[in-house]
Image (cartoon, rainbow, N blue to C red):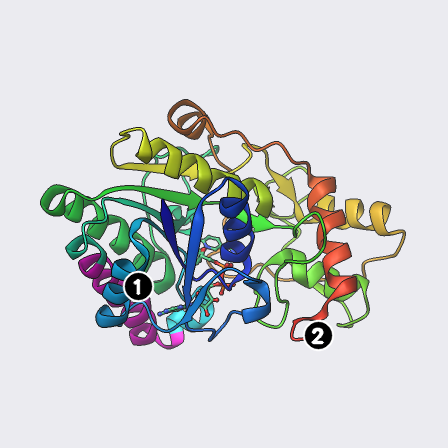
Amino acid sequence: MTTLVTGGAGYIGSITTRLLRSTGRSVVVLDSLENGHAAAVGDTPLVVGNVANTDLVTQICRDNDIDEVVHFAAYKAVGESMENPGKYFDNNVTGSQKLIDAITACGVTRFVFSSTAAIYGTPDSVPVSEASAVRCESVYAETKLMIEHLLHWYGQTRNLRSVSLRYFNAAGASSDSTLGEDWRFSQNLMPHVMKAVLGASPALNVFGDDYPTPDGTGVRDYIHVEDLAASHVAALDYLSNGGQTLVCNVGTGHGTSVLEILQATERITGKPVPHVIQPRRAGDPSECYATTMLAAEKLGFVATRSLDDIISSAYAWHVAHPTGHSAN
Ligand SMILES: NC(=O)c1ccc[n+]([C@@H]2O[C@H](COP(=O)([O-])OP(=O)(O)OC[C@H]3O[C@@H](n4cnc5c(N)ncnc54)[C@H](O)[C@@H]3O)[C@@H](O)[C@H]2O)c1
């Protein structure tokens, strides 16, 4: 059994690749290295190229007897997607469509896809379930929803069974501090918190302290990246056991506020997190966290790591790799 992992040189993809190999799978990574790092792939076979290159994808499938695909490769910066929508529709949607065409032509029938909770936009209520309304508020989110729709139709027409995992907020690093998120590319909260605590930025901007939440700051569902990686193994096993196409939240089911993250970071690191309260940002919901019943029921997946695990692993990673994998 060989698994093709696209985007396996990136943050979540590299940690998932390592976990997949630990389950006994053989893995081939396809990554353009535009936002990833060869060092993060280690000794897993790496093909440097684009998922839209159908000849290359066909060659990889034939050379390696690929029978399942995990598709991480995408651009993910929400702000950039609003400034340059064509770049995102082209790379994320057209790239995925070409990839899916090529792999289904080679007989692949199992596919796990990195979707996002961003497709729920500002939810009417929390927790957010898979039955909640989708309300894309960015080009980035729309590209992910479009790929979910592609997967539905390739399921109808090409016998492709897929699991679209709607990630909530991925955070943390590998427990051995060798793989993590490169803060030069990330818009996520945790790398910004680490920059502030380590003095790599003057202060963290906290956007809004007047939300209708217990302490006024925004509440999100932070899931440890190693738990997230485990959800992909569970999704592949579900498909191997005959599971049908599924769209599924991946979160912890718990909301944590920005101030709670700051306080926990100060407690764990013993250092202050300089921060400045800024006005709310347009489009940021006050609260967003997941229902997790479907993942538990269908995939047997439940996140087990704590917020402290997230913060301590992120801190250790950033201390060891102050400029991401380029420091290696
Ligand atoms: N990080 C999060 O919090 C989060 C949340 C929801 C969804 N996601 C999704 O999860 C996936 C992985 O996210 P990440 O944080 O690891 O991002 P990342 O940028 O670290 O990894 C993405 C990888 O894909 C590669 N890539 C991009 N376009 C490519 C293409 N056309 N062909 C080949 N390689 C290409 C990049 O070089 C990079 O290594 C993405 O699809 C992202 O949209 C991430």
Q: Which circle marks residue 327 in the picture?
A: 2
Q: Quadrant of residue 203?
A: bottom right
Q: Badge 1: how crowded within 10 Å, few (<14), some, or many (20+)? A: some
Taking the image in four quarters, ligand 1 sits in the one at bottom left
What residue range appears in magenta?
Answer: 83-102
Q: Is residue 218 above or below residue 187?
A: above
- The percent coordinates of residue 109 (x first, y second) are 23, 44
Residue type at tag 1: Ile
Residue at the far top: name it.
297
Q: Earlier in the sequence, mark 2 or mark 1?
A: 1
Q: Is residue 207 left or right of residue 169?
A: right
One can see residue 117 in this view:
yes
Give above or below for 212 relative to 45. Answer: above
The residue that appears at 18% across and 50% down in the rendered structure is: 107
Q: Can you say which quadrant of the picture contains the N terminus?
A: top left
Secondary structure mostly seen in magenta is: helix
Residue 326 position within the rendered picture, expressed as x and y whole percent measured from the top left = 65, 75
Residue located at (70% from left, 74% from top): 327
- In terms of depth relative to the viewer, which is nearer, 123 or 296? 296
Q: Position of residue 125 (x, y in %)?
A: 44, 35
> Can you identify the residue that label 1 sits on?
60
Q: Quadrant of the C terminus?
A: bottom right
